Image (tube, grey):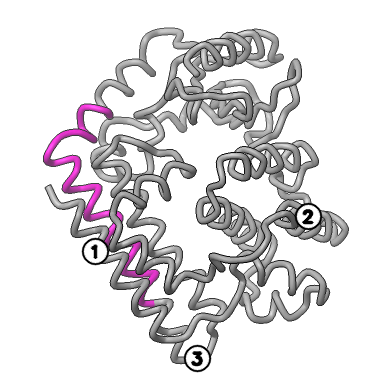
Amino acid sequence: MQNRSNVLIELAANYVEELNIDVGYAGVGGSVGRGEADEYSDLDLIVYTNTSVPKNNLDVLYNGEIIQLDILDIAKIPNEQEILEFPWDYRFLSEMSIIKDNDGLLSDIIKSATNYFNSYDGKKKLLEQVSNIVRERIEFANKCLDENRLYSANIASMGAWAEAGFLYLFVNYNLLSTGGLIPVLEKLNNHIERFKNVSPFSMEGELSDVSLILSSFRQHLRDQGHLYNDLSEVHDTLCDRKIKRLLINKERLNLLWQIYGEAVGLYFETSNGLSLEKYFQDLPISLQNGLSKIGFIPLNKNKVNELSNLSKELLAFCYC
């Protein structure tokens, strides 16, 4: 895996040199930054520039590899005060492998941020920030229950659990990997079994059509005129790679969890504030049926309440 990561880091460095912009700082994150890349991995590349170009996210195909490129203004590099106040927003710095650092600023920021993340004060602030996010999502889930919006209650309570889980992963294992969440939580036998019982995922049935469900949803959104970056055809390939890896490894829960997350992200980016109930109702029946198979179902009060309890449990596991 380290060899694969090194190959992709070198490729990223070549790509940065070929960009027609003045790159001041650049780094690679994700599995490549962690030194865990495999044959299915893509490149998460962040570039900071002073050049006047549109700052956005792009999926780029370069020398046969997929680069998820994030172009930002140099002013977006976080300063020490921002990291102290909102460490959860800048946790990506902990796994960044530097590609370009003109004056050593990025290296200094990463070192300072990493030390803070691992300190007592840093962990306390992380817990405070994530606890607020989890609380807000639980409150919204309960509001949705009161209004009989059970699809929205699903994604709100699942969102609370996911955020708490990612904090648990970060403070206890120093990991940011989305794909690493379920494998780590499976070590908490009682917790993960309770989660399976209340999650919107089916633990039985075939998974062979999961890729088709997601690609059909993405194609429908493209046909509707949405231009969101994650709807690019390059991203289709990225999703297919992820699904193939999980199918080969027979990680059923992890597969459903990640594909559900992809679909939820597409909903948020294309809904224009429309409730999930209305959004879902407006989809073709075939898509409604497909999305239901990967977790778009109404959750009742008991299941939402248990997901809230599981979220609080994960937060409790994060106390310093």
Residue position marked by numbered label 2 in the rendering: 212
Q: Label 3: which residue?
A: 147
| Cα distance in 3D space between marks 3 and 1 | 26 Å
* The magenta stretch spans residue 124: yes
How far apart marks 3 and 2 lie (CA) works out to 33 Å
Residue 118 vs residue 173: left or right? left
Which type of secondary structure does the marked residue at label 1 adopt? Answer: helix
Residue range (magenta): 114-139
Q: In this view, does 305 lie above or below 1?
A: below
Disc 1 residue type (three-letter): Glu
Q: Quadrant of residue 248?
A: top right
As drawn, the residue found furthest toward the right would be 223
Q: Is 47 one of the magenta-colored residues? A: no
Is there CB contact under 8 Å for labels 1 and 2?
Answer: no
Q: Identify residue for label 1.
A: 313
Disc 2 is placed on an element classified as: helix
Disc 3, disc 1: CB below 8 Å?
no
